[in-house]
Amino acid sequence: MRIVVAEDAAVVREGLVQLLRDRGLDVLAAVGDAEALVAAVEEQRPDAVVADIRMPPTHRDDGLRAALKLRERHPDLGVLLFSQYVETRYADRLVAGGLAGFGYLLKERVVDIDEFVDALRRVADGGTALDPEVVAQLLAARRSAESLSALTGREREVLSAMAEGRTNAAIADALGVSRRAVEKHTATIFDKLGLPRTAFQHRRVLAVLRYLERRN
C-alpha cells in the first residue's frame, strides 16, 4: 500500500512514517503543509493519504480542505484524517461526497498502532474508519444544517438581524413589521432549531450560534 503522510509537527510526522514503514507500508512522501500534500499526491498518486487537519499555511483547517480537494480530483484515493479536533464546518461536503474510502480518527483515542494501520488499510480498500465522537459531531452538524434549511426567507431575515445584535423592536423597524410579528417569527425559529426553553440556556444566543456556524 502506497501512502503520503501530511503532518506539520516534524517529530510526529517522522514517528508516524517510521511506524508505517515498520509494518510494511510504502510511504512515498511525508510533508508538513497542505499545499505540499496536494503536490505530493499529484506527483506520487498514492493509494491513500494520512492528513492532519490543522496545518500551514493558516494552521486552521487547511489539511481538511486539501483532503476534500483531493477526493474531488481522485475519487478512488483513500483519505484518513488523523487529528486532535473534530471539524464540522464541511460536514455537508463530507457526507455528500460519500464515506467510501474515508476515515477520520482522533489522535487521543488511537492507542494501538496496529488498529490505526488496519483502519488505514480499510480506507485504502474503499472502506470507512470513523471515530464514534466524529460520527456524533458530524451528525449533529448535519442536523443543524437541515434545521436551518427549514427556515422561511422571513425567518432567516429575523435570525440574521438577531445575529447583528438587534433587539426585537429594532428588527421590527428594519423589516417594516410589528414587534408581535417578530416575536412570532422568533418563537418559530426556536422551535425549528429544536431549542427548548431551559433555565440555563438562552435560546436567542444558541440560535445565533447555529446561524454563525453555518456561515463560517
Image (cartoon, rainbow, N blue to C red):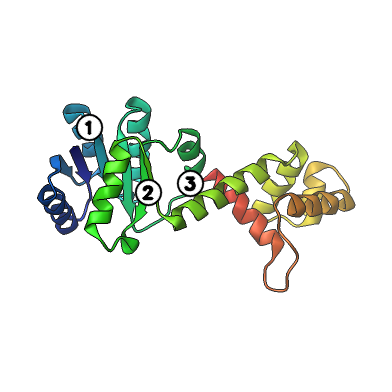
Which residue bears the numbered disc 2? 104
Residue 73 vs residue 139, the one in the foreground: 139
| Type of amino acid at the residue the image marks with label 2 | Tyr
Query: Quadrant location of residue 209?
Result: bottom right
Query: Quadrant location of residue 73?
Result: top left
Residue 191 in view of the camera = yes
For the residue labelled by badge 2, is the local secondary structure a helix, a strand or a loop?
A: strand
Q: Earlier in the sequence, mark 2 or mark 1?
A: 1
Residue 49 numbered tag: none
User: Disc 2 to disc 3, how far (Cα)?
Assistant: 14 Å
Which residue bears the numbered disc 3? 89
For the residue labelled by badge 3, is the local secondary structure a helix, a strand or a loop?
A: loop
Is disc 2 surrounded by few (<14), some (14 to 19) or many (20+) residues within 10 Å?
many
Residue 51 in view of the camera = no
Which residue bears the numbered disc 1? 41
- Tell me residue 53's x, y (percent): 33, 49
User: Disc 2 to disc 1, how far (Cα)?
Assistant: 19 Å
Task: Work out which quarter of the rendered image holds the N terminus and state it.
Answer: top left
Residue 193 vs residue 205, the one in the foreground: 193
Is disc 3 surrounded by few (<14), some (14 to 19) or many (20+) residues within 10 Å?
some
